[in-house]
Image (tube, grey):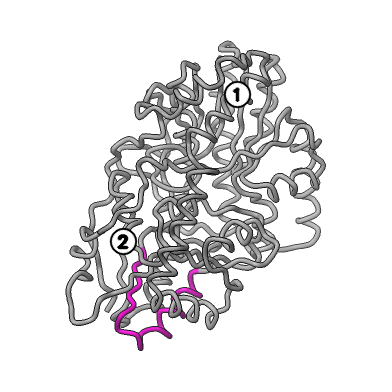
Amino acid sequence: MKILIVGLNYAPELTGVGKYTAEMAEALACEGHDVRVVCGPPYYPQWRIADGFSAWRYRAETRSGVRVLRVPLWVPARPSGLARLPHLASYALTSLPVLAAQLGWRAEVVMSIAPSLMSAPAAWLVARLIGAKSWLHIQDYEVDAAFDLGLIKGKLARRFALALERKMLTRFDVVSSLSAKMVGRAIGKGVDPLKAWCLPNWVDTRSIVPLPHANHYRQLLGLAHGAVPQTVVLYAGNMGAKQGLETLAEAAVELVRRPDISFVFCGNGPARAKLEAHCAGLPNCTFIPLQPAQQLNELLNLADIHVLPQRGGAADLVMPSKLGGMLASGRAIVAMACAGTELYEVVEPRGVVVQPENVDALVGAIEQLASDPSRRAVLGAAGREYAERELSGASVLGGLSMKLEELCGHFEPDSAAARTSSLASPANGLAHEKLAGAPLEPTRVD
């Protein structure tokens, strides 16, 4: 089957949407499909073009069996709400000639990844012109998020943007998203329930596994030795507006009185500088950059407690992709979510959930777990079981492959098990490339 994927972000980005788009494309290519991707150069989460790539040139390459067609992209140094609009528009415009060139290739499925929704009309039009099936996969309700989080303001602008979004969503043959509530939101926007489908972000539960001892990072960060054994509270991921990291910084300030609790912040993004400034002078805070993919398991196992902060306005607009790795690592999780949201329902039975932006509740949850290793072990085991049952790459991507073939009339029930087994192979795209990430350069904020 010929599959054309239109998505702004792609490997070698180590986190976010690009990571999942690349793993999906590589897994489908490994199964024998002919896959092409139209994307921009890597820039996320640092918000600058990666070394070895150009912001202004078209480029074609082959990565793990996938034909990758990169287009020019403008990347703002400061990604404010308004600055993101020309950023997304630049990809939508520069991808047009590449998409036009794919008309002769005649894909059977054209899949558009949102964000960015700005490129979805062109992807849909290509599918319509060549008689292909059109698929929109929503990683993030960017229109809702932009207004609900205050990145863009104005009632008239919001009504106009939502009307355009609704018009676009209802045209695709399939609209998928990450959770049942996010799929429900699509239906609420006018998508036919028969065309809506749940495609959660997955985790490689064979490469992310609980480790009995995770001393590598503890030694590098100076947390392995000392008079007081350390309980490590880890945040690993993008540092942006949706995360509500200021709440976590305030919790670190409150817990400086606890010499047995250390905070480690791993990642990059537009909010990192402000976060470091907030934590300046705190002896219990350590910052490190994004780590190479091959060290992800060691990094996640550094945690005694994973923290997943989130602003209240982000409820059911996004499903944090980092959650899968946290669950698979078998460590306890404290998440910030409102009752009734998908994040709450996933974490609450197997972790601790507190109200978003409630510093006192977050501090209390961390202190209770720091004092109760047995409870941490029980919660971690429950999270691991959930990851294996619901989020394994073989299960999620196996279901995707069968859905694609059913959509195009190629589905053969007798071979379903073989396809799922193929997607579980270590040779597929789930076995991350050994990407060269930033070297470990821990810096204690003084």
Where's residue 279, x and y in %? 37, 78
Give how far across and how far down residue 69 sits, in percent: 46, 26
The residue shown at (28%, 38%) is 434
What quarter of the picture does the N terminus occupy?
A: top right
- Tell me: residue 229, above or below residue 75: below
**From which residue to which does the magenta span run?**
245-265
SS label for mark 1: helix
Amino acid type at image mark 1: Met
x, y percent for residue 149: 64, 64
Residue 259, magenta (yes or no): yes
Kind of element beneath mark 2: loop
Q: In this figure, which residue is indicated by the disc labeled 1? A: 402
Identify the main secondary structure in magenta.
helix
Which residue corresponds to the image point at 29% horizontal and 44% vertical from the top-left? Answer: 294
Camera-nearest residue between 75 and 6: 6
Please give the count of numbered marks on the rendered protein.
2
Q: Quadrant of residue 120?
A: top right
Height in image: 210 above or below 154? Answer: above
Residue 234: which quarter of the image?
bottom left
User: Where is residue 113 drawn, in percent x and y?
Assistant: 59, 37
Q: Are marks 1 and 2 in contact (CB under 8 Å)?
A: no
98 lies left or right of 286: right
Q: Amino acid at mark 2?
A: Leu
Q: Which residue is mark 2?
A: 302
In the shown orientation, is residue 93 left or right of residue 302?
A: right
Mark earlier in primary sequence (1, 2): 2
Q: CA distance from mark 1 to mark 2?
A: 37 Å
